[in-house]
Image: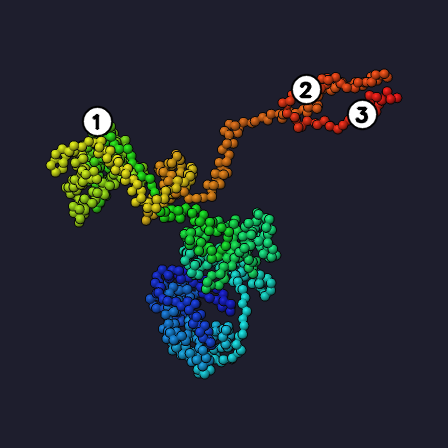
Amino acid sequence: MLTRPFLVKKPNGSFRLVTAFADVGRYSKPQPSLMPDVDSTLRQIAQWKYIIATDLTKSFYQIPLSSDSMKYCGVVTPFKGVRVYVRSAMGMPGSETALEELMCRVLGDLVEEGVVAKIADDLYCGGNTQLELLQNWTRVLQALQKNSLNLSATKNDYRTQNYNYSWMELAIRNYQSQPASYFYIISLSTTRQTCRYQVTVRHVAGAAILPSDFASRNAPDCEDSACQICTFVQFTENSVVRHISTKDILEGIQKLPFTSRNAWISIQTECSDLRRTHAHLRQGTRPSKKLTNVKDIKRYLNNACIAKDGLLVVKRNEPMAPTRECIVVPRQVLDGLLTSLHIKLDHPSTYQLKSVVHRYFFALDMDKAIETVSNGCHQCAALQKIPHKLNVQSTGDPPETIGSAFAADVMKRERQLILVVREYVTSYTAARLITDERQETLRESLLCLCVELCPLDGPFAVVRTDPAPGFQALVNDELLRRHRITIEVGRFKNKNKNPVADKAIQELEDEILRQDPNTRCISPLSLTLAIARLNSRIRNRGLSAREMWTQRDQFSNNQIPLTDQNLIQRQHELRKSNHSYSEISKAPSGALPETPHLEVGDLVYLYNDRNKTCARDRYLVVSTDNSWCNIRKFVGSQLRNTSYRVKRSDCYKVPSLLNTLRQQDTYSHDNSTSSDEDDNTVKTQSPPKPPDIPNVISIPHSQELEPELFENEPSDLSLPIGENELQHDPDDQVNTDVIRRSTRKRHPPKFLQDNYFLSQ
């Protein structure tokens, strides 16, 4: 019945036959037993001053199997065929319980006296004096010898060190000798002080186990895919059976995942803010007060410190607990870490996630990030309990006449189906037993109940129903339209889609119970009597439904002076006046529902879909229309074709960062989009505009002639006024790009002066 065995070589050169007892576990029923834990054993050992530690020789081998159990413990081996276990083996289901029960029977009285402490097959005997230890050890050996149990001399600790106690060297010689020579005791000096080392246990590759040198102390981690230990660890981490809860982490039973210090050291070095923080802490400096763009670094420096291994941590002191080092998490990886922890811990609440994360990690604005991650989880949104919001009550327009508006629904009771029809104004009710909810059955029953109540001429009588398949098939039924009856189906996701029919079914159920509290299946006669009693009940307008329908006294059958319009108006006013009280009763807090901003493609949930047995369904928004939207349901791996029309205020949208990025990136180019034809056409570029010509260049060249020089007359070098001058309009703007003429004062040479020749 066992799986295929294989041999494992021992350190001493021998081999061990290894088999798996997975198939045996299907037939074995483990016996419940209270196993000792390590903490209680250590507390018991700490009370003794002298101690002896020993071990049983092949403890499981000393437990024989019953003959009925041997047939399940056979194994086929290539070594002399089939082998059958006749004694218990390590790993066999129930072997630990059997060993614990055996040791309790042998040494139970000594354990109760506080002389012996045991855990699995390890035994610890102690005493406060050497003589007391000898006496206790004698009793232990006598009990073991009486029950034919052997101790392992090779596995005993010849040297046992107990700090803060006087310790000695103990060794077992032969427990079959006289009690005086069971062991020898060599007293040594008491230990005065001890050293504390920071020890890290890692699994390294076999090739990395070298002699004591630098390579052995800094061996690389094992990354061999064929390694059994690595495969077991990976299988355990990824197993769906291995459940990690926030309660176990807070109680210290399990450790929070993703807390590898070596991995976080490399992650912190990739963050620029943490690198600068690490440099400031190592150098003992602070950033300048004038720097306003390093707020995160200044906040890190107020709390963080450097651990012995170079990791940035924040030390937190808790009452009655040692100092805890919380790993500093960069902002860039905080959301991803919180999302992974939220999924790994099986979607805890916001408070539970805060309690766990604050114990092992530190980050800036961590509480806001935790709330964002929890609010953005779709599974949590589907199960979230939301308080009742204030829904604005409304009522439709009143009917014009009595007998033109009805409400119908099917009541299911004691495996019976009853079709109930009620008139809107007078609340006059009629009912009939039906066999099923098929289209033909509902059509026939509606005609039998409504034909006598509907007018023969005028507008069609409207019968409001819920969106059941049988009623939906009667929306455009020709036979009903021939008798001037039409079906109006209520909105599917509206919880109050057919309130008149719901109230009629509730009142009819009460009348049936009043008539016969112990009734089970109802007969047509009992149903008729219950309907008659229901129509005779006095309503809020002082009349019964029968009196308002017939306008006659139900006791004397005398005519009652009534008008239909007064009844219709009075009923409409009563419904409107009751809206405020109904809103308060359904939502005492008075909080108004939030109307989320929905777009096509958003995933939403409906508040009213939550119940005790299932979570909310997920919907996809396919279109929006002011305060309404059309959604489609996700069912498993399918998207239903049916579209539901709901209010925006009835939808709960899970906040997501993707929607914000999509609004910023995708819809930022709406004004710059062009049609496909414009994108496909090749646009020819027009030639560049020539530069403006400066005004100086545009001035025509002045025909300046060299003046004629006369001896008696001075030469007039001035030009006539108005010649070769530019006329500028005072309204013209000065061109700043024009080459500016020099305003330097001119000094012509002497021979060009007017009196030069006269002075000669």
Q: What is the crowding at mark 1: few (fewer than 14 residues within 10 Å), some, or many (at least 20)?
A: few
Q: Amino acid at mark 3?
A: Pro
Query: In this figure, which residue is indicated by the disc labeled 1?
Result: 457
For residue 665, above or below residue 14:
above
Mark toward the viewer: 1 or 2:
2
> In this view of the protein, which residue sits in the foreground, 670 or 71?
670
Q: Residue drawn 48% across and 39% down?
A: 662
Q: Which mark is residue 194?
A: none
Residue drawn 73% across the image and 17% down it: 721
Question: Does label 2 or label 3 sit earlier along the sequence?
Answer: 2
The residue that disc 3 covers is 748
- x, y percentage for residue 640? 36, 39
Q: Is residue 353 left or right of residue 511?
A: right
Above or below, comparing residue 715 to residue 213 in the picture:
above
Q: CA distance from mark 3 to mark 1?
A: 118 Å
Q: Secondary structure beneath disc 2?
A: loop
Disc 2 marks which amino acid? Answer: Gln
Query: Is the Cβ of the residue at disc 2 closer than 8 Å to that at disc 3?
Result: no
Q: CA distance from mark 2 to mark 3?
A: 27 Å
Image quadrant for the C terminus? top right
In the image, taking residue 269 as reference, residue 6 lies left or right, namely left
Secondary structure of residue under mark 3:
loop
Residue at 40% across, 79% down: 139
Q: Residues within 10 Å of mark 3 (few under 14, many from 20)?
A: few
Q: Earlier in the sequence, mark 1 or mark 2?
A: 1
